Amino acid sequence: MNKIPVVINDTKLEVDPHKTILEVCREHDIEILTMCHLKGIIDIGACRLCLVEVEGVHKLMSACTTKVAPNMVVKTSTERIRRYQLITTELFFAERNHVCAVCVSNGKCELQQLGYKVGLDSIRYPFLYPQCDVDTSHAWYVMDHNRCIMCTRCVRVCNEVEGAHNWDVMNRGHQVRIISDFNTPWGESISCTSCGKCLHACPTGAIWPKAIVQGQLQKNPAMITELIARRKMKL
Amino acid sequence: MIRHELHALTERVKAKQEHFKHRICVCCGASCISSGAEEVLHKLQEEIKSRGLEETVEVIPTGCMGPCNQGPLVKYLPEQTIYQKVDCDNIQRVVQSQLVENKPLEDLLLFADSREKAFVNANEDPFFKQQQKIALKDCGDINPESIEDYLIAGGYQALDKALFLLSPEEVIAEVKQSRIRGRGGAGYPTGLKWETVYKYVSDQKYVICNGDEGDPGAFMDRSVLEGNPHRVLESMAIAGYAIGATKGYAYIRGEYPLEIKRFELAIKQATKTGLLGKNILGSNFRFEVEVRIGAGAVVCGEETALIASIEGKRGTPRPRPPFPAESGLWGKPTLINNVETFAAIAPIILNGGEWYSETGTPKSAGTKVFALAGKINYSGLIEVPMGTTLREIVFDIGGGIQNGAEFKAAQTGGPSGGCIPAAHLDVKMDYESLMSLGSIMGSGGLIVMDKSSDMVDVARYFMEFSMDESCGKCIPCRVGTKMMHDLLQKIGDGKATQIDLDRLEELAEYVRDTSLCGLGASAPNPLLSTLRHFREEYVSKILPAE
Ligand SMILES: Cc1cc2nc3c(=O)[nH]c(=O)nc-3n(C[C@H](O)[C@H](O)[C@H](O)COP(=O)(O)O)c2cc1C
Ligand code: SF4
Ligand code: FES
C-alpha cells in the first residue's frame, strides 16, 4: 500500500493510510494518553484524553477515531492539550470515589498511572461522591461502581469479543451507570458467560475477582488485544 | 397515478370546493388546543349546520396561526379576519356578526383588547405585516389532515416539476442557488450537503428528516409538521430524487402525538394517491417514508445519535468524521436535514433558487421561523426574513415587553445559545451577526427577559438543562456540566469566591473545546455570554477576598 506523508509534532513521517492518528503515533513512539481505547475493540472517543490539534480543523480531534490524511499536520502535546488532559484527569478522580489506598488495583491502575503522567498533585474540583452500588452478587467477580470511569471497555469487550452483551449503559449525564442485563444483579445475569474478559479490559479497580486483597489485582488487557488479533489471523 | 392525473385531480378537488364562499379556520395548534380549540371547532361546525350554512361555509381545523397566547383563534377566509379568545359562549355572536350581518365583531378581533384599533384584515396588523411566510405558508389556512387542501394550495407541484423537468443535478443546483442553510442549528449550506451525499456511490442511501426539536420553548418544527405535513413529505421525496435515495425516515418526538398522527396520515394519503411509493407519477422514481418515534432525549437530535437511535441502539453521538453524508444510517450515505429546512425546499424548487435567495441577507438567505416566548406581549410563532432586527421582532411584532417593563435580554438558541443585551437590540438576526455577539441562531427559540431576570440564574437554568440532557458518554460534558452547574448554584447562593469564578471560566472553555458532540461543546454558551454581557451581576454575588 502506498504510504502518505504526515507531520506530527514537526516530524515528517510516511505512514499507512486508513490508520488512525493514534495507531500512527503508537507505531512511532509518540506518546498519546488514552483511557477508553483498548486496541482491538471499536473506538468511541469518549475519554477525550487523546485529543490532538490538527492544522486547519478548528476542533480538537480524538486521535483514536480520526484517520490520518495526506499532508495532515498534527500536534499532540501543546500547552492547551496538556492543560485539558490535567482537567480531564481531575474530573475522573472527582466524579466518583477513588481511594487508591484501599483499592485492589493500587499500583496497577491505569487511572492512577494517568494521574502520575499528567502531574496531578491535587484536585481543584469538589468530589461528587454519588451513591454507587457495589455488586457482589456474581459467584466469582465484583463490580464496584464507585471506581468505574465509564470508559465502557467492559461493555465493548463483552459485546464485540465475547458476544454476550451482558454489560450496557443506563441513564444520562452524570447519572450514567454500567448495568448487567436489564439492570439486574450481575449474579442473576442470563447473558454473562463468566468469561472474565471485562475484568481484564477494565482500566481501574471497578471489576475484580473475589478473594483478592488490596493491591493484588493482576490485569492483562493486552490479552484481549492478543485474542482479537489471533481470531483475525484464523479468518 | 401518472403525471397528468395529478393535474386533473387538483382541478377536480378545486371544483369541489368552489361552492364554499367562506372558510372558517379554527387554529388547532398545540397552544390553541390547550385553551379549548377542539371544542370550539365542534361547536362551530354545529353552529354552521344549525343555521343551514354548511353548503357555503366550510369549517376546518388548521395548524398554528402564530399569535399563540391569544388563542383559541378563529380565522375567516377570504376576509383574513382573525378572532381571538373564542369560546363556546361567544361563538354565536361571531357567526351572527361575521356571516349573517356581514360585519366584523369588533370586540373579539385579534388584539382588540390590547391595541387601540384592531385590524379587520389581520395581515395589516404589525404582528403579521413584518412577517414573510415561506416555510409556514399555508400553515393556518389549510386542513393538515387533508391532502386535497394541500393540492389546492399548489401541493406536489414541486415534486412534479423536479421529477419531470429537472435532473437530480439541476434540483441540487436550485438548492445551492437558494443559498439556504440548515435550520437545525448549525447553519450548514443545504445545497452543499445534498451535493456531497449525491456524489457518494452506494447501493442504498437514506433521507432523514430531523424533527426531534428538544430545546425548551421551541415549537417551530412541531408547528410545521402539525400544520402542513405534506410540505415536508413532498420535500423529502424531492431530496430522495436529488441524492438517489428511495427511503426516508422522519424522526419525531414521542411527546408530540398529534405531530406523529398527522404526519403518518399524510404518508398514508400520499401513498394512496400515488405521490409516494413505487413509480411516483409514472416517473419510475420510488420513495417511501417511515416515521421513527424518539423517546424525548435532546441529544437524539444530534445527527449521529439520531441515526444510532433509528438503528435501535442507545442514542449517543459518535465522533465525526465520518459524517452521515459518507457513512450514516446503517453505514450508508445519508442526508439529514431539519424539518424547517425541508419546509422551504418545495417552494425553492417551484419558484427557483434565485427567488429564495432574494430574501434575507447575503450570507443568510431566506426566512427563519422563531418561537417567541418569555416576557413579551404577543408570544407565538413567527417567520421573518433573515436580517430582521431583534428590535423589530420584540417591539413591532411581539408588541414589546409585558406591563411596559424594560427589556433586559433575549436568549437565542436555547441552552446552546446566548443572550443579547439591550445595547444590541438592533442586531440583525442572521447567523454571522448572532455569532459575533457570542450567541447562535440555533433552531429558533427566542426567549425575552425583562429586568426581573437574574442572569446568573438564567445561566444556571440552562446549565441544568444541558447537565440533565448530556448523554454521559464523554467526560467533559458528563462531569463538566455538573461541576459548572454546581459552581453557578454556589455563586447564586452568594457563597462563591473569585477562585470559583476563575474555575468556572476555565471549565467553560475546557468543556467547549473538548466535548465529543455539539451538546457539550455549546453547553457553556449561556454561561459565557452572560459573563460577557452581564459580568457585573456575577461579580456582585462573589464574596470579597479574605
Ligand atoms: C445536542 C444537539 C441537538 C440537536 N437537535 C436537533 C434537533 O432537534 N433538530 C434538528 O433539526 N437538528 C438538531 N441538531 C443538529 C443536527 O445534528 C443536524 O445538524 C441537523 O439536523 C442537520 O439539518 P440541517 O442542516 O437542515 O440543519 C442537534 C445538534 C446537537 C448537537
Ligand atoms: S458532549 Fe455530552 S451529549 Fe455529546 S457525547 Fe459528550 S456526553 Fe454525550
Ligand atoms: S482514547 Fe480517544 S477518546 Fe479515549
Image (spheres, coloured by chain):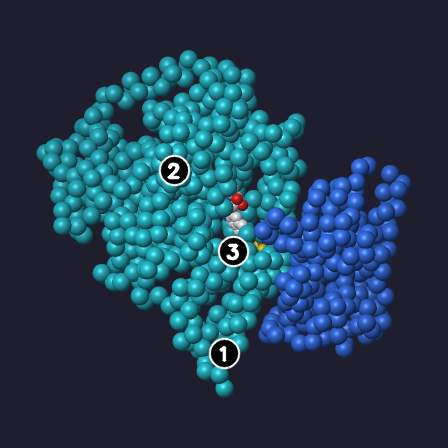
Front residue of this view, candidates B501 and B79:
B501
Numbered circle sitting on residue B366: 2
Chain coloured blue in the rendered structure: A
Residue at 79 percent across and 40 percent down: it is A3
Quadrant of ligand 2: it is bottom right
Residue at 11 percent across and 33 percent down: it is B102
Subunit under mark 2: B
Residue at 30 percent across and 58 percent down: it is B375
* Number of numbered discs visible in the structure rendering: 3
Residue at 63 percent across and 54 percent down: it is A60
With respect to residue B278, does B530 lie above or below? below
Farthest residue to the top: give it: B4
**In the rendered structure, which disc, 1 or 2, sits on the residue that comes first in sequence?**
2
Task: Name the spot of residue B455 as percent of width and height, x first.
Answer: 40, 66
Q: Is residue B339 visible?
A: no
For badge 2, the amino acid type reads Gly
- Residue picked out by circle 3: B522
Residue labelled 3 has its Cβ within 8 Å of some atom of ligand 1: yes
- Residue picked out by circle 1: B497
- For the residues beneath circles 2 and 3, the answer to whether they share a chain is yes
Q: Circle 3: is it few (<14), some (14-19), or many (20+) Cα within 10 Å?
A: many
Farthest residue to the left: give it: B101
For badge 1, the amino acid type reads Thr
Q: Secondary structure at mark 2?
A: loop
Q: Are marks 2 and 3 in contact (CB under 8 Å)?
A: no
**In the rendered structure, which disc, 2 or 3, sits on the residue that comes first in sequence?**
2
Q: Are marks 3 and 1 in contact (CB under 8 Å)?
A: no
> Quadrant of residue A209 in the image?
bottom right
Chain coloured cyan in the rendered structure: B
